[in-house]
């Protein structure tokens, strides 16, 4: 039994819906279908979710919503028209859309969540209708009825553990289940969504809950690639990789699959297959547990990410001073700041942060308090910091991987500001200047993949 999730671009138009239908029809073990909201049809297009956000904002500000409702409705109408669905059969969806302000007249954050969630809900209802019209026994299943329970954070919900038992009950129903991605219901019966792109998470939760053999994640790329195709021309597609390889690469910018979506699949040990809706005949990328995985190459991928800042602190005899790090961590806690890494030397310490947490003001306040409380001899804030992740299960048993990483960088005069190798030995993290990051990725990629045949 398979759980199959289709992303926004896979459901963006009637033509795309047709491909989805073909995929569902091609394999009777595709049992649970998870939908995103219709995404972009072309580069400048607007995702339905973003239109719904606009609709919610206008509702909250008591502005006219006629135009945005029409824009949203046109997206669904066009899909229905492609399948020549009779208007009265799907008119209830229009009513649902228009009635959102009445049905969810709630605190602003829950109103926003409920509006956003309807991109996937209307899409799932429409897909179920089209499948039924084509004679396939299908059932639309609302998260409320499914028992898909989540925590109360309106736009960053987490699944509640009882959801898994609730979902298992649906394993035996004879119909194909079409379920909306991206949201669940709180124990108070309110709609709460996952973070953006969260339909991947829904699919993974269903796959674990229903004990699926495979979680197929259909998107618009042929595979996950060994490097970002915007940096490296025609990089190697990854045939197979482990959960933790993907976790490490997602951390540094691989964004094909939502990083939070890995967790339920890992807990349930469900294999994930990322595939292309436009080329379902291609094998895509399989993501599997570490156990029994035999790496064929030294590295699986290399990625870079620029949203980091570093705080450099220098103090003589830092290694002898007790409580230095403790005081520093207390200050991070006070300012509600999490840190990513903290490589240290005898007299210095660098702390790397996700800089999206900071406003200019918050950073200044925090740095001035650090100066006051722990009196470093030098405090420097480095804003143009990038992290490069070189990842591969194959590095564990390979001596000399580091040489192959540093040699091409030295040739290009790229300075390495930090090196960090985790105990798992499957990843090496480098800190470089932001302007060197893309070149560093490209050089490391060439070093490991040049001459390797794309199988
Ligand atoms: N539609 C939601 C978004 O645009 C969730 C998803 O597509 O996975 O973020």
Image (spheres, rainbow, N blue to C red):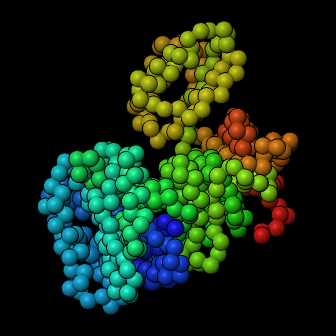
Q: Nearer the viewer, residue 344 or 379?
A: 344
- The answer to whether 4 appears left or right of 191 in the picture is right
Which residue is found at the position 30% from the left and 88% from the top? 85
Instruction: Decide: is 241 above or below 47.
Output: above
Expressed as whole percent of the image width and height from the top left, the position of residue 52 reads 29, 63
Which residue is found at the position 58% from the left and 29% from the top? 351
Q: Nearer the viewer, residue 167 or 351?
A: 167
Which residue is found at the position 14% from the left and 58% from the top? 62
Where residue 191 sits, quadrant-wise, is bottom left
- The answer to whether 396 appears left or right of 388 in the picture is right
Instruction: Decide: is 237 above or below 266.
Output: below
Expressed as whole percent of the image width and height from the top left, the position of residue 125 reads 31, 73
Which residue is found at the position 70% from the left and 34% from the top? 423
Expressed as whole percent of the image width and height from the top left, the position of residue 215 reads 53, 63
Farthest front residue?
172
Q: Nearer the viewer, residue 233 or 448?
A: 448
Res 436 seen here: no
- The answer to whether 187 appears left or right of 292 in the picture is left
Instruction: Decide: is 223 above or below 198.
Output: below
Res 277 seen here: yes
- The C terminus lies in quadrant: bottom right
Expressed as whole percent of the image width and height from the top left, the position of residue 8 reads 44, 68
Where residue 312 sits, quadrant-wise, is top right
How many callouts does the rendering have? 0
């Amino acid at each position: 039994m398979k759980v199959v999730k289709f992303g926004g671009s896979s459901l963006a138009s009637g033509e795309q819906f047709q491909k989805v239908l073909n995929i569902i029809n091609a394999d009777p073990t595709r049992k649970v279908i998870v939908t995103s909201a219709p995404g972009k049809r072309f580069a400048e297009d607007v995702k339905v979710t973003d239109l719904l956000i606009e609709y919610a904002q206008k509702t909250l500000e008591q502005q006219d919503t006629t135009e945005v409702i029409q824009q949203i409705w046109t997206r669904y109408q066009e899909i229905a028209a492609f399948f020549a669905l009779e208007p009265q059969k799907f008119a209830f969806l229009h009513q649902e859309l228009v009635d959102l302000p009445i049905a969810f007249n709630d605190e602003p954050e829950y109103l926003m969540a409920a509006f956003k969630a309807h991109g996937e809900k209307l899409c799932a209802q429409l897909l179920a209708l089209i499948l039924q019209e084509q004679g396939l026994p299908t059932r639309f299943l609302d998260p409320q009825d499914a028992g898909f329970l989540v925590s109360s954070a309106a736009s960053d919900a987490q699944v509640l553990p009882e959801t898994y038992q609730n979902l298992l009950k649906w394993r035996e129903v004879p119909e194909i289940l079409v379920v909306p991605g991206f949201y669940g219901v709180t124990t108070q019966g309110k709609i709460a969504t996952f973070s953006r792109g969260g339909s991947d998470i829904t699919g993974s939760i269903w796959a674990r809950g229903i004990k699926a053999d495979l979680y197929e994640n259909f998107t618009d790329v042929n595979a996950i690639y060994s490097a970002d195709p915007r940096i490296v021309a025609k990089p190697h597609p990854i045939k197979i990789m482990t959960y933790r390889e993907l976790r490490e690469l997602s951390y540094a910018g691989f964004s094909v699959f939502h990083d939070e979506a890995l967790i339920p699949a890992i807990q349930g040990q469900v294999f994930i297959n990322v595939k292309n809706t436009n080329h379902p005949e291609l094998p895509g990328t399989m993501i599997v547990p570490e156990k029994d995985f035999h790496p064929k190459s030294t590295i699986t991928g290399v990625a870079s990410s620029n949203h980091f800042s570093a705080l450099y602190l220098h103090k003589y005899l830092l290694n002898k001073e007790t409580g230095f790090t403790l005081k520093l961590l207390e200050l991070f806690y006070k300012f509600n700041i999490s840190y990513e890494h903290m490589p240290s030397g005898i007299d210095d310490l660098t702390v790397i942060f996700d800089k999206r947490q900071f406003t200019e003001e918050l950073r200044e306040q925090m740095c001035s308090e650090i100066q006051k409380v722990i009196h470093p001899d030098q405090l420097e804030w480095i804003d143009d910091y990038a992290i490069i992740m070189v990842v591969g299960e194959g590095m564990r048993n390979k001596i000399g991987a580091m040489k192959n990483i540093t040699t091409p960088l030295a040739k290009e005069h790229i300075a390495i500001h930090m090196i960090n190798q985790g105990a798992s030995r499957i990843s090496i993290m480098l800190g470089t200047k932001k302007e060197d990051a893309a070149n560093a990725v490209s050089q490391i990629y060439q070093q490991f993949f040049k001459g390797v045949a794309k199988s």
